[in-house]
Amino acid sequence: MPAPRPVLDALRRQYLQLLAPADMTLAQLPPSLLLDQAFQHALYTHLFSPDCARTTPPPPRTYTARVVKRLIAAIEEEAWKEGYACPEIDEVLIDFYAALLATIPASTTPLGSAATAAAHVTYTIAPPASAPAPAAPAAGASLTLLESRSVISSAGHTGSRTWEASLALGELLISSHHRTPHPLTFPPAAAPTPFTAPPLPHKRVLELGAGTGFLSILCAKLGALSVLATDGDWRVCAALRGNVAANRVSGVVSVRRLLWGSGGVLEDAEDADQREGSMAPDIVLAADVTYDTAHLPSLAHELQHILTQQNPHAHVLVAATVRNPETFAAFLRELGNSPNSVQTDPLLTAQIEKEHHSLAWASALWTPHAPRILYYATAAPIRILRITAAA
């Protein structure tokens, strides 16, 4: 049977994003498809063939071997369920797997474990299948970052990988760019209402806690006029500059070190205006920056400075993976009192009694786009916050 292009495209996106083989949608494929050798060969052609590596940096060989091993196991499992004593597997796929194993040194990390060394991770900027033509085309179908998938890098920071909330916020930006509003519910709305992130073309964007630079580079590819990617760790900034250069967006994205609470004072800026943080961004983005209670007061102070001293009309979107509800609630307390959100947000356990900063916020639970644009874990809830200057 002909290989369905959407199925192949989805698997390729998962593969290039280094999704754990067990989390890939191979097991969800119909048995008739998995057992079809033409489909198996199409998988090889679409994911693993040398032609693919000419356009996109390939994943590490150890990871590729894990994916092929998982694919072969899925084929064998379905064959046994169907009563086949000897499953038929495409010879090219088998030969490719054997060649992979022959080139992986015995001392390399075992195939069953996750890779921790830096590797290229490619995120496909794929429009939803039902989307109309975008308002402005993306300047590139994908972006590739050098990441380490370990939770904490060997240098002791968390900025070496792209986290779930960044991908969720990126998915919102992509779907909005392609004119497919997401049904987020921001209080006090009683029912889901279509929400579109502010358009990026011709806008000035500031990212706080940029990490790998995923959101900043994405904004550049979606047409932003200028992007200032900031992080508080100089080692993260150095790696971020490498990712910006590799994606050929250095003319749009600049990287600076910014310590929250400094009032927008940028380090390593070329001119006095930049050092004083006078960018006046139209859009401010931050993702997975609320995990440490020690940094929450300075983060809230920085957001207040932006909305009161730089641009009171800026669109501020913060995405947070709520791994610890108490930490997330502490961030909301730092922002200030927002009665509508207190009444409707089930994550809060108490009323906010004291306003720490002159900010208002609304919180909405994020659900991944369907069909998926990017792939990330959803075991912990992800919240999207809109933050504004208090009236």
Image (tube, rainbow, N blue to C red):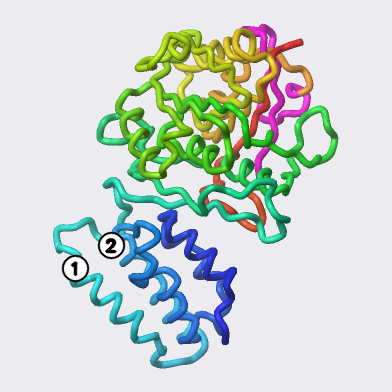
Q: Position of residue 23 (x, y in %)?
A: 48, 59
Give the residue type at disc 1: Thr
x 43%, y 28%: residue: 254
Q: Within 10 Å of the Cα at label 1, are there few (<14), some (14-19), or many (20+) other Cα atoms? A: few
Tag 2 secondary structure: helix
Q: Position of residue 196 (x, y in %)?
A: 72, 39
Tag 2–tag 1 contact (CB < 8 Å): yes
Is residue 249 covered in magenta?
A: no
Disc 2 or 1, which lies upstream in sequence? Answer: 2
Tag 1 secondary structure: helix
Rendering quarter of residue 190: top right
Question: Residue 356 or 11: which is nearer the viewer?
Answer: 11
Q: Would residue 261 be visible to someone looking at this image?
A: no
Which span is picked out in magenta?
A: 341-367
Give the residue type at disc 2: Arg
Question: Residue 265 or 133: which is nearer the viewer?
Answer: 133
Position of residue 362 in the picture relative to residue 79 (left or right): right
Q: Position of residue 109 (x, y in %)?
A: 22, 56
In the rendered image of this protein, does residue 33 appear above or below residue 104? below
Position of residue 152 in the picture relative to residue 277 (left or right): left
Q: Within 10 Å of the Cα at label 2, are there few (<14), some (14-19), or many (20+) other Cα atoms? A: some
x 57%, y 87%: residue: 1
- Which disc number belongs to residue 61? 2
x 46%, y 86%: residue: 37
Rendering quarter of residue 43: bottom left
Residue at the disc numbered 1: 103
